[in-house]
Amino acid sequence: MELVKLSGSIVYDKTTMLLIKNFNIFVCFRMLLMQPKQIIEVFKTKNGREVTIRVPDIGDVEGLINFINELVDEGAPILTNERQTYSSEIRYLADEIQKILDGKLIALVAVADNKIVAHAEIRKWSGRASHVGTLGIAVLKEFRNLGIGKELIRLLIELARS
Ligand SMILES: CC(C)(COP(=O)(O)OP(=O)(O)OC[C@H]1O[C@@H](n2cnc3c(N)ncnc32)[C@H](O)[C@@H]1OP(=O)(O)O)[C@@H](O)C(=O)NCCC(=O)NCCS
């Protein structure tokens, strides 16, 4: 993956570019196809909690409803401010999984103690803009500042490169 241009609010750390607000990544995509439920990595957070990072699966619908609704209740700066229902979430997730299988999306969830605590994705654009992707990320409040967001972004970029 070649990073050509970044736009939006961008936060850097010294070694890795951490992109933590809405932005678009302009990339050359050579996406490795991922499989639902595929474990990408198990890692320990700064405070020693074990977190599994994996590809979402259709069985994650309940976990993702709880995840998104916790962010909505908090008023987190995500793309929706409406609580999700089973029917809206299953439609979203089925579409997300199809896009993963089609190589149009890289999506990851972070799971701690069987709970989805973070979600991150790079959504590939289409047509002449198919070298462009949009990154979205959210971590539950209780799990922020533990390095999960940074690790998810590092993995997304690595997966987009491969
Ligand atoms: C933004 C967000 C994804 C960061 O995830 P996180 O797991 O808390 O981030 P990390 O713990 O990996 O932090 C990585 C670095 O970014 C810094 N950082 C984290 N949140 C930051 C913020 N809001 N502003 C500035 N720096 C921030 C951390 O201090 C850390 O720096 P360090 O590596 O020098 O110690 C998380 O706070 C979140 O989900 N917020 C609500 C939703 C949101 O804003 N999503 C993005 C817009 S769609």
Image (cartoon, rainbow, N blue to C red):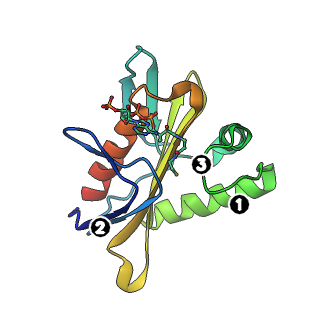
Sequence-wise, the earlier of marks 2 and 1 is: 2
User: Which residue type does callout 3 highlight?
Assistant: Pro
The residue that label 2 is drawn on is: 29
The residue that label 1 is drawn on is: 91
Kindly report which numbered mark, 1 or 3, lies closer to the viewer in this rendering: 3
- What number is the disc on residue 111? none
User: Which residue type does callout 2 highlight?
Assistant: Phe
Provide the secondary structure element on which disc 1 rests.
Answer: helix
Q: Which residue is painted at 36% across and 25% down in the image? A: 43
Kindly report which numbered mark, 3 or 2, lies closer to the viewer in this rendering: 3
- Using the rendered image of the protein, determine whether residue 106 is visible from the camera's viewpoint: no
Of residues 135 and 40, the one nearer the viewer is: 135
User: Which residue type does callout 1 highlight?
Assistant: Arg
Q: Is mark 2 within 8 Å of ligand 1?
A: no
Question: Where, quadrant-wise, is the N terminus in this rendering?
Answer: bottom left
In the displayed image of the protein, which residue is found farthest to the top? 48
Of residues 79 and 156, the one nearer the viewer is: 79
- What number is the disc on residue 77? 3
Q: Is mark 3 within 8 Å of ligand 1?
A: yes
